Amino acid sequence: MRTGLTISGVGHAAVLLWCVVTFVARPYHAGTSEALPVDVISTSELAQITKGTKNAPPVEKPKPVAEKVAAPAPVDDPLAKLANKEIKAATDVPPVPERKPPEPKAKKPPQPQADPIADALKKDDDKKPDPKKPDPKPPTPPKKPAQQEPPPFDPRNVQALLDKRTPQRMAMVGDEIGNNKLSLGGPNQSAEQLSQSELGALRDRLQNLWNLPAGNKDPRELTVEVEIQLKPDGTLAAPPTVLTQGSSPLFQAARDSARRAVYQGQPYTMLRPEHYELWKDVIVTFDPQYIGRY
Amino acid sequence: MTQHNSSSDIGWLNRRQAVLLGAGAAGALAGLTPRRAGAVVRLDITKGNVQPIPIALPDFIGTSAGDPETAHDVTQIIVSNLQRSGLFAPIDPAAYIERISSFDAFPRFPDWRQINAQLLVTGRMSREGGRLKAEFRLWDVFAGSPLDGQQFVTSPENWRRIAHIISDAIYQKVTGDKGYFDSRIVFVDESGPKDRRVKRLAIMDQDGAQVRYLTRGDDLVLTPRFSPTTQQITYMSYGQGEPRVLLLNIENGQREIVGNFPGMTFAPRFSPDGQRVVMSLQQGGNANLFVMDLRSKATTRLTDTAAIDTAPSYSPDGARICFESDRGGKPQIYVMGAGGGGAQRISFGEGIYSTPVWSPRGDYIAFTKQSEGKFAIGIMQPDGQGERILTEGFHNEGPTFAPNGRVIMFFRDPGGNSGPALYTVDVTGRNEQRTPTPSFASDPAWSPLLS
């Protein structure tokens, strides 16, 4: 008896302990699912939205060139920023001695240029290159001639030589092109979707007009697929094409009723002209399966 | 009565259409290829509207003297037929914009679209060597195209049937189901005070017109039933002797007794091929089902129970019989093979089920249900599922199906001093209508289509 109890106790304890040690509490990962944009919209809201888009600012085409942009006032600042980049164009930059800000920057560029020499010099005299501002200056005094006269070839300057455009221009184009603006999508993209409210309105319209006589024996056989081609004004571009085949009188009646609904529904003004590419061709399936037999 | 699918007369139209179609097809082909570029939006419509279809029926055109009146009457019959079906909503002629003056010209569809007509029927009545010729066309107003066109030639006195046949053609084109307008009703006409009712067999068109009496009213008559194939009626007559099942030829009035049984026979009904009559035979306190072959007169017993088996009705394929039996205590509905044998109970609801009738479409069995002091007309599937009450009241009884199985006729007695009258209701439970009869009427039976 006592031994039994002990064995049982020890056994249970062992199992519990084993559980405590081996059970790993891992965080439960539910598969990440992408959020699906769903808009719940009443018909009145739909009308408001449709009105709203009319007043929306006209979509500007992306500016391919920025010839005129060079003029704007903020020119000074970008120039200052750019000066940083234009390390290799150091020879050009010095021409602005009257300002203070450019000066310190102008000082620095020479340093890297002089690196190989400076390295050697530094060991000799530490802070000597700094006071030696005049060093790089000799080429600068003749402002314009300096530019025409090719500076001594430096392979590290190749990049600067290749791009002859003014630094301002680069700056502004970058500013304009930057993806910091809201966009309605690319001009040629068809990734846009018809909004659910547009589809819903179209569906409502057809459902209201589709009149299938009740009491058919087996409504399941009477599914009709109709292809509709529309013009931009929402009217039919061609008679609706029935894609489903059938010959029974019941099918013919269902087909005719579907076709009547399509004819009667035009013009389909709930489809926005902006999306015409998307809805110029619509396939509608009329499925009477759930229309009760009573 | 002759009938052609109008070919010669609308031939020009076909040719013109062919040209149009050809042009349209070429256009469609040219238009198709570039359109395939983008993704196609797909849409499922799973709900619809169950509302009467607006239809315009201007008076048919009468070409010779006297025809305009006939044409008007024919149009009126079609209008009332379609209206009573509950599936069409004829538009008031006062709203019509275009006056149809020529049968051969295309109607001006925009005019009809404007009054919201979905369908338009035009027609012409004319004489051809003393015979009446009727032509009609059914137009789809919104598509602007003809849906159907037929012509019929008959003797002038058959103008009512022409109207019914045209109604059936329109009904079938639009619903896909066969119509039921060209059919007749046999019923028991009741006249006189309540304690001394005179009951006569009568027959009329399904719309209540052309009532004709088949018996004089000396004997009590009950449960008349149409033969599905011939001009015969079987019914129960209660004269001096015992109640008997009789066979009556509508055309020549000849009568004959069905079978030679000792005891009362009742609740007769024809088999779908019209060759046999199944009925109930009383034996002591019990009643069993028998079937008799009309040609060989051979009878076969179908049930043998110590209960009352009655009101047998064949399934449309003739393979099974549904009937009423109180073998389980209360009267309920059972189904068995046409040759007899084991029966299966299919009704399990509260109350008493009686007078089962199998739909000609095969999908339902209609019955009278009695519970809580009310009589209801209902339908259920042949396996007993999907029971549905269509109408309920003080006294409703005796359902009978229209030839297409979409409408049920029954009789209703409001109680008190008045008497029974005939009503129709759709199997959907909608569209309940009274059928006009000259006096009280009960026990209706719907004939098959005449044509």
Image: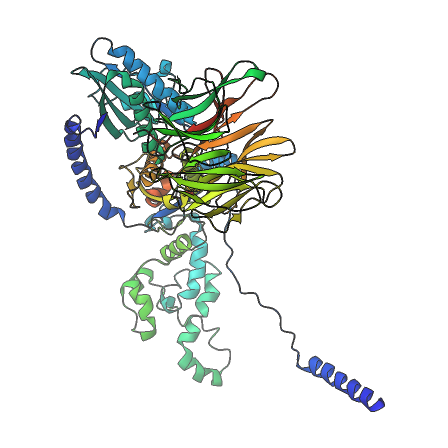
Q: Residue at x 25, y 22 (%)?
A: B107
- Considering depth in this image, is B18 or B425 the residue closer to the camera? B425
- Is residue A173 placed above or below B310 in the rendered structure? below
Can see residue B18?
yes
Residue B285 relative to residue B211: left or right: right
Count of marks placed on residues: 0
Q: Residue at x 60, y 42 (%)?
A: B349
Question: Where residue B51 sits: x, y (%)?
Answer: 44, 30
- Considering depth in this image, is B9 or A87 the residue closer to the camera? B9
Question: Where residue B394 sits: x, y (%)?
Answer: 60, 26
Q: Residue at x 73, y 81 (%)?
A: A16
Colour mode of the rendering:
rainbow
Q: Quadrant of residue B372?
A: top right
Question: Where residue B81 sits: x, y (%)?
Answer: 38, 23
Q: Quadrant of the N terminus of chain B?
A: top left
- Considering depth in this image, is B109 or B53 the residue closer to the camera? B53
Please, which residue is most extreme toward the right here?
Answer: A2
Please, which residue is most extreme toward the top here?
Answer: B65
Question: Where residue B161 sits: x, y (%)?
Answer: 31, 22
Can see residue B358?
no
